[in-house]
Each structure stands twice: as structure tokens, then as C-alpha cells.
Amino acid sequence: MRVVIQRVSRASVSIGNEILSSIGHGLLILVGFEKNDTIEDIEWACNKIINLRIFNDAGGVMNLSIKETNGSILVISQFTLHALTKKGNRPSYIRAAEPAIAIPLYEKFVNKLSDLNGGKICTGRFGAKMSVELINEGPVTIIIDTKNKDF
């Protein structure tokens, strides 16, 4: 599982001209699943995300987590996070999980984040063509890969 986490002052996701979800201060999370991802990957990633100290404290030091700042979370599915670009110029998505596998993993991911963050998680619509807008605060962008935890 790969996750791109962006600290935002605001973010939204639209389908066509309709805003599906929007948040203020918080995290925009792009998540992509591989065929062999498990509930253990979800547990590890969600715990890591909720406890990442990437928000500024009173002294301006990144020392607070999303829970400590009462921030919101917007989660967007993005299979292209598993693009393989080694050969040629057309990315391969062979590692990305098919919808039958990815949708239940996505739902478990969203539910686990909601449980850990003590509230609602905003989402896009799995498999839809979406437009995402954000103001990346900092900018702060963190990448997590459950198959490469040193990343």
C-alpha cells in the first residue's frame, strides 16, 4: 500500500461540477493498494498517519499529530501510486489491486482512520474521475509505503 499525505489548509474533491467532499485544516491522503496488501498493512499505515507529528506547535516546530490539532482528513483512492515506469514511457499498473480487492481495502482503510481519529473521514468516490484541489501547507508531503517502511 502506498500513501501520499499532504498537510493542507484546505482541500476538496469534485466530480464534474459537484463538490463531493471538502475539508479545512488537516490532511489530504492519496492511497493506492497492491494485490497483496493485508489488514496488517492498513493497521500499520493508519496508526502511522494518525500519529505523524507534522503540524506546528506554538513554537512553530512540527510536533503535533492530526489528532492533537483536531484536523480533518480527506481520503482519495489513487491506483496510479503503483505506476511502474522502469520500461518505456507508458506506466504499467500491474501491481495495483483490481477493484474487487481494492474497494474492500479502501473501505477498511477509511473506517480504521475514522476509528483512530475519533470521527468522520471525508472521501472521494472510488473509481470515479475526480478533480482534487488543495492548498498544501508548508508545503509538507510525506510518502508511506507499507512494503518499504524505510521510505
Image (cartoon, rainbow, N blue to C red):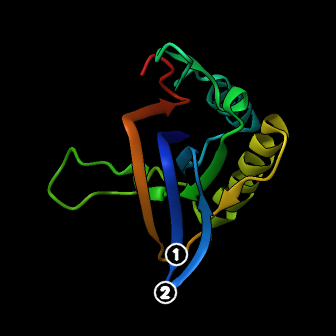
Farthest front residue in view: 58
Farthest left residue in view: 88
Q: Nearer the viewer, residue 43 or 19?
A: 19
What residue is drawn where x is 47% and y is 14%?
A: 61
What residue is drawn where x is 72% and y is 30%?
A: 67
Q: Residues within 10 Å of mark 1 (few under 14, many from 20)?
A: some
Image quadrant where one finds the N terminus: top right
Q: Secondary structure at mark 2?
A: loop
Q: Nearer the viewer, residue 83 or 45?
A: 45
Image quadrant where one finds the C terminus: top left
Quarter location, residue 55: top right
What residue is drawn where x is 69% and y is 61%?
A: 103
Q: Secondary structure at mark 1?
A: strand
Q: Is residue 17 above or below residue 8?
A: below
Q: Is residue 92 above or below residue 45?
A: below
Q: Are marks 1 and 2 in contact (CB under 8 Å)?
A: yes
Mark sitting on residue 69: none
Q: Position of residue 70 (x, y in %)?
A: 72, 37
Q: Can residue 124 be seen from the camera position used here?
A: no
Mark sitting on residue 17: 2
What residue is drawn where x is 70% and y is 37%?
A: 42
Q: Is residue 115 above or below residue 100?
A: above
Q: Can residue 12 be seen from the camera position used here?
A: yes
Quarter location, residue 143: top left
The kind of residue on which mark 2 rests is Asn
Q: Position of residue 110 (x, y in %)?
A: 73, 50
Farthest bottom residue in view: 17
Mark sitting on residue 14: 1
The kind of residue on which mark 1 rests is Ser
Horizontal side, residue 14 vs residue 38: left or right: left
Horizontal side, residue 16 vs residue 38: left or right: left
